Amino acid sequence: MKSISLIALAFLPLCLFSQGENKMKIKEGKFYSYPEVLILASQIDGDNASGYNKFGYQLGLITGIGLKNNKSLSFTMGLSERGSRRLFNPDEPSLNAFHIRYTSLDLGLLYGVIFNSFHLQGGIRSTYLLGITETENYVPNIVQDYQKMGVLLDLKATYPLNDQYFLTATFQYSLMSLLNPTVSQVNYLMGGGGAFHNVLGLGIVWKP
């Protein structure tokens, strides 16, 4: 929870000084493209470590088109780092500290709607594992345990700070287990086991 609080505090001044009269505008039939930068607080459900203790990032380029009735369809691509972390706790010395860094290439498809001043979007984000390390050497052969491909549910809300800069928040959750079948027979979210990304993020979108 400390990670979430720090992210929220970092963006609080932006919210306080934002211009509330700005509205999201997406014109029907018009294409748009803009970059986004997010700070991620993540955990991996199923690794016996609770809390969004892993800081990461999401760098992306969003391209989309405006549809009828303030709707949109967007394609996203970028680079991200998610993962999980458990710090050493002197009160529980039997629990080993670990720090999983999961770097991936992301491709996503999002359907959106303008609601008041918010651009609300939801869709699917696919990931291709570029590299995974465990920096505390608790799991030395971790690369053998994780699948190359992943799929996440991606929910996003974007709010205008002014005419060019927008605050964006996201929630992402794996729809299939991150682990190889040789490690875990659970492949999907409803399987009652496995390992799944659980991610919250806040960031800035710049629309030139």
Image (spheres, grey):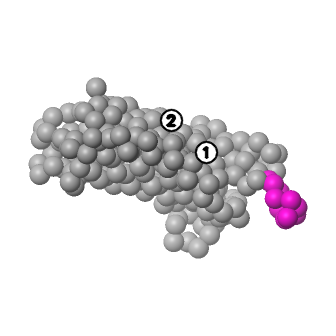
Q: Quadrant of residue 197?
A: bottom right
Residue farthest to the top, as pictured = 208
Q: Secondary structure at mark 1?
A: strand
Marked residue nearer the N-terminal end (1 or 2): 1
- In the image, residue 38 above or below residue 47: above
Whether residue 74 appears in this view of the structure is no
Q: 64 or 23, which lies in front?
A: 23
Residue type, numbered disc 1: Phe
Bounds of the magenta span? 88-97
Q: Secondary structure at mark 2?
A: strand
Which one is in front in this view, the residue at disc 1 or the one at disc 2? 1
**Tag shown at residue 55:** 1
Which percent across, then down, holds residue 141?
78, 46
Q: 200 or 176, which lies in front?
A: 200
**For the point 62% across and 54% down, which residue is it?**
2
**For the point 32% across and 41% down, which residue is it?**
18
Q: Is residue 95 magenta?
A: yes
Which percent across, then down, holds residue 61?
38, 33
- For the C terminus, which image quadrant? top left
Read off the residue under disc 2: 79
